[in-house]
Amino acid sequence: MSAINGKVVAITGASSGIGEATARLLAERGAAVVLGARRTRRLDEIARDIRDRGGRAVTRAVDVSRREDLEGLVGNAVTEFGRLDVLVGNAGIAKIGPVADLDVDGWSAMIDVNLRGILHGVAAALPVFRRQGHGHLVATVSTAGLTITPTMAVYAATKNAVRTLLEGLRQESTDGVLRTTAVSPGFVRTELAGSIDDSQVRERILHNMEKIGIAPEAVARAIAFVIEQPRDVEISDITIRPTAQG
Ligand code: NDP
C-alpha cells in the first residue's frame, strides 16, 4: 500500500494542470484531498470524479492572494479530515515579458499569487503543523528560477523568492516538525500560457509547451514521490524537466 494512503493534502491551483493532476494522483493513492482555486465549477467536477472513483475530495473557493482564503482551505482540511499533513502551494501565474515593458500590474499580480500566496499558506498551515507535531510544505517553483532567460526575470524572481523562503523555513525547522520541498518543473503542457498578456511571448511559450512540454502527470508523480518519504527524510528540491529542454 502507498505511503500516501490516509494522508490529508490541501492543494492550491487544483482546478487545472499540475494541481489537478496532483489531486487526482494523490487521491488515487489513498490521500484525502482538499482542492482550492478560484474556478469552483471545475474544482467541483474534479472532486466529483475523484469521489466517483472511490476517492476522498472536497473543494474550497480560494484566491491565494487573500490570506483568509488560505485559512479557510487549511480549516477545511482540519474540519473535514481531522488534520493537514501536506500543503501543496501550487497556484501560479506567469505574466512574463521583458522588464523594459514595465508591466508593473503584472509584476504585482505575480508577487501576489506566486509569492504572497505561498506566504499566506505558511501563515495558515504552520500553526496546524506545529500543533500536530508534523507537516510538509511543497511549493511549485520553476526551472525558470534555475536558469534565468530573457522575459522571465520577474516570474523567476517570484519563484526564487519562494525557493529562498522554503530554505529559510527548513533551516528553522530542524526540530523535525516541518519538511519543505521546492518542486521545479520545466515546460509542462498546461493552461499556464493563458496568463501571458504579451502575445509574442505567449506564442513562444505555447510553442515550447506543445513541442517538448511534458504531461502534468509527470510533475504529479514527482510530488507524490516527495510526499511518500518517511518523516525523517526531506527532499528539499526536485527538478522535473523535458529531456529535450536546454
Ligand atoms: P495552470 O494555469 O493550468 O494552473 C494554474 C493554477 O493556479 C490554476 O488552477 C489556477 O486556478 C490557479 N490560480 C491562479 N491564480 C490563482 C489565485 N489568485 N488563487 C488561487 N488559484 C490561482 O498552470 P500550471 O499547472 O502549469 O501551473 C501550476 C504551477 O506550476 C504554477 O505555480 C506555475 O508557475 C508552475 N510552473 C508551470 C510550468 C509549466 O510549464 N506549465 C513550469 C514551471 C512551473 P484558478 O484560475 O481556477 O484560480
Image (cartoon, rainbow, N blue to C red):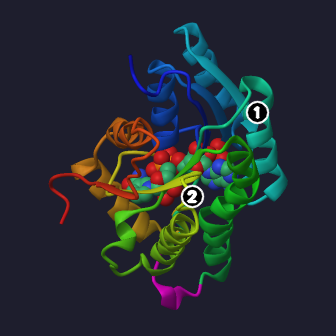
Query: Is 2 in the magenta?
Result: no
Residue 77 image offset from top left, x and y in percent = 72, 33
75 relative position to 161: left or right: right
Give the labeled residue for mark 1.
78
Quadrant into which the C terminus falls: bottom left
Residue sitting at x 36%, y 81%: 150
The residue lying toward the viewer, choosing from 156 and 105, is: 156
214 relative position to 155: left or right: left
Residue 82 image offset from top left, x and y in percent = 74, 27
Residue mark closest to the camera, 1 vs 2:
2
Q: Tell me which corner region of the image, top left, top right, bottom left or bottom right, holds residue 109.
A: bottom right
User: Which dot marks residue 116?
Assistant: none
Residue type at mark 2 is Asp
The magenta segment is 96-102
Give the labeled residue for mark 2.
175
Residue most toward the front? 175
Residue 194 in view: no
Quadrant into which the N terminus falls: top left
Q: Residues within 10 Å of mark 2 (few under 14, many from 20)?
A: few
